[in-house]
Amino acid sequence: MSTRRRVLLAAAGLSACAVLAAALLAAPAGGFGSWFGSDAPSPAEEQVSAAPGPSASATPSAAASPSAQPVGTCARPAGPAPVVKISEVKLSTAATGYGREGDTEPLPMAIAERPAGGSWLAWLGTDKRVYLGRLDCDDKLVGTPTSFAGIDLQDVHADRTGGVVLLTRPGKCGSGKLCGGSSSPCNTMHMIRFDDLGRQVWERQVTNLSGSRTGYDDGARFVWWYQHHGRLATDGKNYAAYFGVAITVRNGDCVDIHEGDRMQVVDANGKPVPGHRDAFEVGCSHSWTTRIVWDPRTSHYAMVCATDNACRIAQPDPYRTVAAGTCDGSLFGGDLVLAATRGYWTAWSQGGTVRLERFTTGKADLTVKTGARSSHPHLVSYGTGRMLLAWASGSSMAAQVYDSGTGKTVGAKFTVNARDHDYQAFKAYSDGSAAYPAAGGSSRSIRIARVLPLS
């Protein structure tokens, strides 16, 4: 291991999370920046590491049935002002509830556009399985959902022949000696490739545990209990996963466990793309709210994180500050979208104040003070040249459309009658709409909130 890497991981001075038990109860909603120490200025530039190979195709618990509805791009009606359509999806199995909505807790549900029409809806069951169902253009469930072994759902993304779901599975900590603190489960992160019927094609671990490397071995990259959520993006050929990761580092005759984030790119056959220019073993540290988008204009994946390294919203590997913040426990990174012509917009909050930042590489060149009061904003592309900001407002959500070039508001603020979750995401659709999966009226239903296209 390089001296640079040792500096990165040792600087925080955390001995296997000696405050694990207390932190489980006291971790701030916006991240751990209020009590984690600051890391060194920049991480080592390591690329995709070897990971266990993809498994043979597994048989899902049930095969999805073809939809009776003809497939094709959904042409939802556009109007002069945003219209919200709420659909209730009835499930045959219970979905995991919201809980305390913390960044250390399981993520209940995610949604993605199916290019042939409709959506893929993923949800975390209460039986240690992640379910995947197909929705038609009216956001109604068609066919029989499939399921995959998984203890936590992260994200789902779709393409014309299927898609990928990102999820967490149990791993092994092994017998390595901790320098301090209490033991915790050592889990693994996986991409699961599915076909257009929802059946598994391959799986790929994007952490690096194996039969010869467990969580408490030097060099392990795994998923621990904290700061572990992730997102997917695709360039149309490969898939990228950007997620929080635990980092094991030898310290004499014992090991310390640190935290950062990791980005890995996997090809269409489930194999890691060696030496991918955007991938890294560790980027931001300590890191939370990892966000990623593919930019076809630059042919690069763009990413931002919230980090207690100088307490900021930053681009990883190498660090570049987008917006300066404070490690007071309220620093939170929202979502990342393409700006109208070049660069990106990200939403973030500090002390309950929501801002939008436009940037290309490094410091933002435009800041919009939105006036929204929220600790966890959401941002999504919304048709051509627009983006949608949403945030919790009582038992529902409030939303505002913005111009994705100038950052100016478009129309008036409106209500989305669905329950917010701090870490779930709106997803953009090619017809100009945006959809959000939310808790339904019971544990056996999910509410899809769709903001119809704007003319």
Image (cartoon, rainbow, N blue to C red):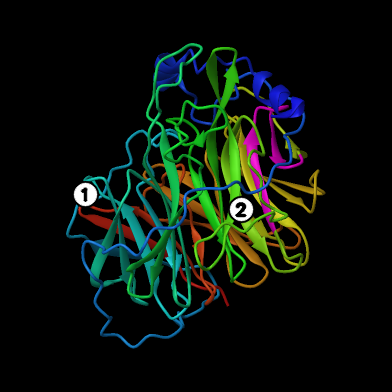
Judged by its main secondary structure, the magenta piece is strand
Look at mark 2 in the image and give the residue it sits on.
292
Residue placed most toward the observer, 4 or 227: 4
Residue at 41%, 63% in the rendered image: 202
Residue 386 position within the rendered picture, expressed as x and y whole percent measured from the top left:
64, 66
Describe residue 113's horizontal placement relative to residue 38 as left or right. Answer: left
Which element is circle 1 on? loop
In the image, which is nearer the foreground, mark 1 or mark 2? 2
In the rendered image, the residue lying farthest to the left is 92
Q: Is there CB contact under 8 Å for labels 1 and 2? A: no
Q: Amino acid at mark 2?
A: Ile
> Which residue reaches farthest front?
212
Q: Nearer the viewer, residue 296 or 222?
A: 222
Give the percent coordinates (x, y) of residue 258: 57, 25
Q: Which residue is mark 1?
A: 443
- Residue 320 is tagged as none
**Residue range (magenta):** 301-318
Q: Position of residue 75 (x, y in %)?
A: 46, 83
Nearer to me, 17 or 3: 3
Q: Amino acid at mark 1?
A: Ser
**Quadrant for the C terminus in the image:** bottom right
> What's the residue at 27%, 53% (across, down)?
440
Looking at the image, residue 207 lies above or below residue 436: above
Distance Cα–Cα, label 1 vs label 2: 30 Å
Above or below residue 194? Residue 438 is above
